[in-house]
Amino acid sequence: MTDPRKIVLVGMPGSGKSTLGRTLAEKLNCPFFDLDELIEKKEGTPIAAIFPEKGEGYFRNLESLVLEETLDQKQAFVLATGGGAPCYNDNMSLINAKAISVYLDVPLNHILDRLNQTQIEVRPLFSGLDTSEIILKLKNMYVDRHSFYEKAKIKLRGEDISPELLIAEWMPYLKGES
């Protein structure tokens, strides 16, 4: 059953899920979780090391396991997923069954601006790519992932999505009106 007190943010890498999630959790006085950080804690190694050492398939299965464990918690929370999490192992259906999903649909040019060189180094899917390759990869990812993200219960579009806007869209779910 969907628990409206659980909010799960989905969207492209660099769309602001973690940044917005932390602020939102603070405003709602509930814990914030970053799925990638939970995976790193469980595995005891950075995600950037998991990909080359164990492969993307291993990572995606681990990601699904940690996602399900997190969604099964009884408490309210805000969770930021990795960009690919909703697209594998029927994770988006799982998210929608147990929480309120929110798609942060940020224009790709703004995502590219946010993905400075430091961030790119810790994102294994962009590692070793130059700017033109990153742009192409982002466009391809968007095409591949957009249909999964669109299954979210709440869709917010634009470059400056505020916690207040998200809360306003979320309130009907909390009140049982959606």
Image: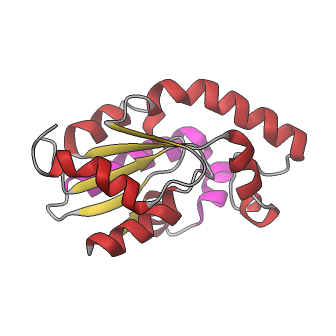
Q: Position of residue 70 (x, y in %)?
A: 29, 57
Comparing 102 with 120, the one in front is: 102
How many numbered callouts?
A: 0
Is 60 part of what is drawn in magenta? yes
Q: Is residue 176 left or right of residue 6?
A: left
Which span of residues is magenta-colored? 46-72
Q: Is residue 176 left or right of residue 132?
A: left
> Which quadrant would the C terminus be assigned to in this image?
top left
Comparing 124 with 112, the one in front is: 112
Q: Indicate the colouring scheme.
A: secondary structure
Q: Residue at x 36, y 35 (%)?
A: 152
Q: Is residue 154 left or right of residue 97?
A: right
> Which quadrant would the N terminus be assigned to in this image?
top left
Q: Is residue 48 left or right of residue 6?
A: right
Is 48 part of what is drawn in magenta? yes
Q: Residue at x 70, y 45 (%)?
A: 125
Q: Position of residue 80 (x, y in %)?
A: 43, 56
Q: Main secondary structure of the magenta part?
A: helix
Q: Residue at x 53, y 28 (%)?
A: 146
Q: Position of residue 7 (x, y in %)?
A: 30, 53
Query: Relative to 105, is 66 above or below?
Result: below
Comparing 30 with 56, the one in front is: 30
Q: Position of residue 166 (x, y in %)?
A: 37, 53
Query: Relative to 110, is 137 above or below?
Result: above
Picture quadrant of residue 26: bottom left
